[in-house]
Image (spheres, grey):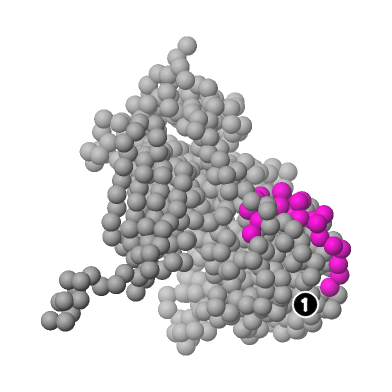
């Protein structure tokens, strides 16, 4: 099981920027599990947060490639260890 | 006084120093073509025969001149025909500004005639793309486009301009780039210089690898100076060819799948690798798990995304190759590595006796591609700018042409686009009018963009075209022979008469199949003042060796 990774991106919310950013993930066949997008203040970069389980090397490559997207101002990642099964899943497995 | 958005575009282009654009008109870009009509004295428009040709010509122009190539197309199919050229330019770090017309902004998303989501189509094939719907935004967007195309790792950008933005009036003609993009400046990092120098000082078996970034940064002098100071055996990638003089005693050949035997084998014996302006492409590394395991790698690249992407790096120098090598050279101790260099020469002799010698011996019934390129190299004194297509002839040209001048090799490396050579050579001839430009193509690739003979005829550029005709898709045939038990599937080409076709375009042409006639034919071609096509009929069953089989290690390179 791959560790859980959160990738944070700050980017100017120009036309089609989100699509260009998503392409970096889709090209590596990474499945985004949660996506949050905030563009709350005019003239300031939008903030995006992508949550996914993925190979740490893939995550590093994605972060490096996102850094090369013209509109991206900042990108960084947080990594958590592979998640233990949730209590409900454990119970279901026992049953 | 207000001018139209289209006129603002033309003015913005000329302010960027653009003197040549490649394109094909159509409905959604007519205001721009109208503006071009009024600017013919300042801006040369080259009318291609297909938009893919415009994109490749712009690539050739960019790579021969060092300035961004510019191409124009209409909406819909015009724009979609650009896509191969865009991706080719992205893979090979070629600065290009592509401009497409688009339906009026009020019709966007309505499936209007010749409407296509060009921005959506371009996202995976460009460094940046932008749709302009207001005339006031045209000039600043063009300024930004040029900045982005050139900055850091160069690449293609696409500007999609709606018809109403082209036709509307604007007073904004100042071309200052807004929101300057400073990716390379932000990531520049030369803090590892001293560690890099220390690694080179203590190396016993160092290897210098030069990639396209050396040519892009015009860092050939710096690479040569460092190699000579530190006594570094020096190899080049396919796109790094001509960055280092082939005849230099430290030059050890080309890396990669069909590169030279010695640098491939000895990559896995090197203890320090200094890789400059290259991205460790899979064609260079072979099986990654075994690649350069004994080497401590110093990677010089302007793009931090390339560092540690494929090969673990001990020291990364993130900067333009010229800047990094200039800073590194004085820190390195003068050294010689004669015994190590002698290892390269031993393996080179093996390659010569097993492959190169027989290839050039001229004793078979049919001519071999290597003989043709060898004679071309001799008769042009290695001075030509070679533009090659994709396939066996590409590898043979890379292996046998004795590049004597820098920036003399243009090919489609990353994407491997058949059909690249002819239009790219047209662009290269316009970007470097002082150079002798020779396109070398196979019988398969030349037919993919053969219609660009029309462009050549119209422009009367002195591009020479050599078609190495083996009546097969040779590289695919080679793989079928070696790896698919000889089952030749759909690789036999029944070809037209290339000479008649060229003459139909009023381009002088001849065909040669006898070895004894080759030199005279090449001499006639080189001496001709205008465009010329020479078909050389070669053997059908030649294979390109050495070869690293797909998935094998570089040290498993085969000589037969």
Q: Residue at x 76, y 75 (%)?
A: B205
Tell me residue B164's x, y (percent). 34, 26
As displayed, is residue B88 above or below residue B539?
above
Q: Residues within 10 Å of mark 1 (few under 14, many from 20)?
A: many
In the displayed structure image, the side of residue B50 where residue B286 appears, left or right: right
- Residue A11 appears anywhere in the view: yes
- Write the residue at 55% across / 44% down: B183
Image coordinates of residue B78 in percent, x first then y, are 39, 44
Task: Inspect the magenta stretch and tell me whether residue B348 lies in it.
Answer: no
Q: Residue tagged by mark 1?
A: B344
Residue B334 part of the magenta segment: yes
Q: Is residue B259 above or below residue A46?
A: below
Picture coordinates of residue A82, whole percent (x, y) = 35, 70
Q: Label 1's element? A: helix
On screen, residue B25 versus residue B474, left or right, reads left
Residues in magenta, as a range:
B316-337
In screen coordinates, is B8 left or right of B543? left
Say which residue appears at 12% left-offset and 81% top-offset: A95
Above/below status of B392 relative to A23: below
Identify which residue, A35 or B142, lies in the foreground.
A35
Single out the residue that lies furthest toward the top. Answer: B1
What residue appears at the point 79 percent right and 52 percent down from the top-left corner?
B221
Specify the subunit that label 1 lies on.
B
Is residue B375 among what the camera can see?
Answer: no
Give the number of marks. 1
Q: Quadrant of the C terminus of chain B?
A: bottom right
């Amino acid at each position: 099981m791959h560790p859980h990774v959160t990738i944070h991106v700050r980017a100017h919310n120009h036309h089609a920027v989100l699509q260009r950013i998503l392409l970096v993930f889709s090209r590596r066949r990474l499945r985004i599990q949660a996506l949050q997008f905030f563009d709350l203040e005019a003239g300031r970069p939008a903030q995006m947060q992508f949550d996914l389980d993925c190979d740490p090397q893939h995550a590093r490559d994605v972060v490096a490639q996102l850094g090369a997207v013209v509109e991206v101002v900042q990108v960084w990642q947080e990594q958590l260890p592979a998640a233990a099964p949730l209590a409900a899943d454990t119970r279901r497995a026992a049953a | 006084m207000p001018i139209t958005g289209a006129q603002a575009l033309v003015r913005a282009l000329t302010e960027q120093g653009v003197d040549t654009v490649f394109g094909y008109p159509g409905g959604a870009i007519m205001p721009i073509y109208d503006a071009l009509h009024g600017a013919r004295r300042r801006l040369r428009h080259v009318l291609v025969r297909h938009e893919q040709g415009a994109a490749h010509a712009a690539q050739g122009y960019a790579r021969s001149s060092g300035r961004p190539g510019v191409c124009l197309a209409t909406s819909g199919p015009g724009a979609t025909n650009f896509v191969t050229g865009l991706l080719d330019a992205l893979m090979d770090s070629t600065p290009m500004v592509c401009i497409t017309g688009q339906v009026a902004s009020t019709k966007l998303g309505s499936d209007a005639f010749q409407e296509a989501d060009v921005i959506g189509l371009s996202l995976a094939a460009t460094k940046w793309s932008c749709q302009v719907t207001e005339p006031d935004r045209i000039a600043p967007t063009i300024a930004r486009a040029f900045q982005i195309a050139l900055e850091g790792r160069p690449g293609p950008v696409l500007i999609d301009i709606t018809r109403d933005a082209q036709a509307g009036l604007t007073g904004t003609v100042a071309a200052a780039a807004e929101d300057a993009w400073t990716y390379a400046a932000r990531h520049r990092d030369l803090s590892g210089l001293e560690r890099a120098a220390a690694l080179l000082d203590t190396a016993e078996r160092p290897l210098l690898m030069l990639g396209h970034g050396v040519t892009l940064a015009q860092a050939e002098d710096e690479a040569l100076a460092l190699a000579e100071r530190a006594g570094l055996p020096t190899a080049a990638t396919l796109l790094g060819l001509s960055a280092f003089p082939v005849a230099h005693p430290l030059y050890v050949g080309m890396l990669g799948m069909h590169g030279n035997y010695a640098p491939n084998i000895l990559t896995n014996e090197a203890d320090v690798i200094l890789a400059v302006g290259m991205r460790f492409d899979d064609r260079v590394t072979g099986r990654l798990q075994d690649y350069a395991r004994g080497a401590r790698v110093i990677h010089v690249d302007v793009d931090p995304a390339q560092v540690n992407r494929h090969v673990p790096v001990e020291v990364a120098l993130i900067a333009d190759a010229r800047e990094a090598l200039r800073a590194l050279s004085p820190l390195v101790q003068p050294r010689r590595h004669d015994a190590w260099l002698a290892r390269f020469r031993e393996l080179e002799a093996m390659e010569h006796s097993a492959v190169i010698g027989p290839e050039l011996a001229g004793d078979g019934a049919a001519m071999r591609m290597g003989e043709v390129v060898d004679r071309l190299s001799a008769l042009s004194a290695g001075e030509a700018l070679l533009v090659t297509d994709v396939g066996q002839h590409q590898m043979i040209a890379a292996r046998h042409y004795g590049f004597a001048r820098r920036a003399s090799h243009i090919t489609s490396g990353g994407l491997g686009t058949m059909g690249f050579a002819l239009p790219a050579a047209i662009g290269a001839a316009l970007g470097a009018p002082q150079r002798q430009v020779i396109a070398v193509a196979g019988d398969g690739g030349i037919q993919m963009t053969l219609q660009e003979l029309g462009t050549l005829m119209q422009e009367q550029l002195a591009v020479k075209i050599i078609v190495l005709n083996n009546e097969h898709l040779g590289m695919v045939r080679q793989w079928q022979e070696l790896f698919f038990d000889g089952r030749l599937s759909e690789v036999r080409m029944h070809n037209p008469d290339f000479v008649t076709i060229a003459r139909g375009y009023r381009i002088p042409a001849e065909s040669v199949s006898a070895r004894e006639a080759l030199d005279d034919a090449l001499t006639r071609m080189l001496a001709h003042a205008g465009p010329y096509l020479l078909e050389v009929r070669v053997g059908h069953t030649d294979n390109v060796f050495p070869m690293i089989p797909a998935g094998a290690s570089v040290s498993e390179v085969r000589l037969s």
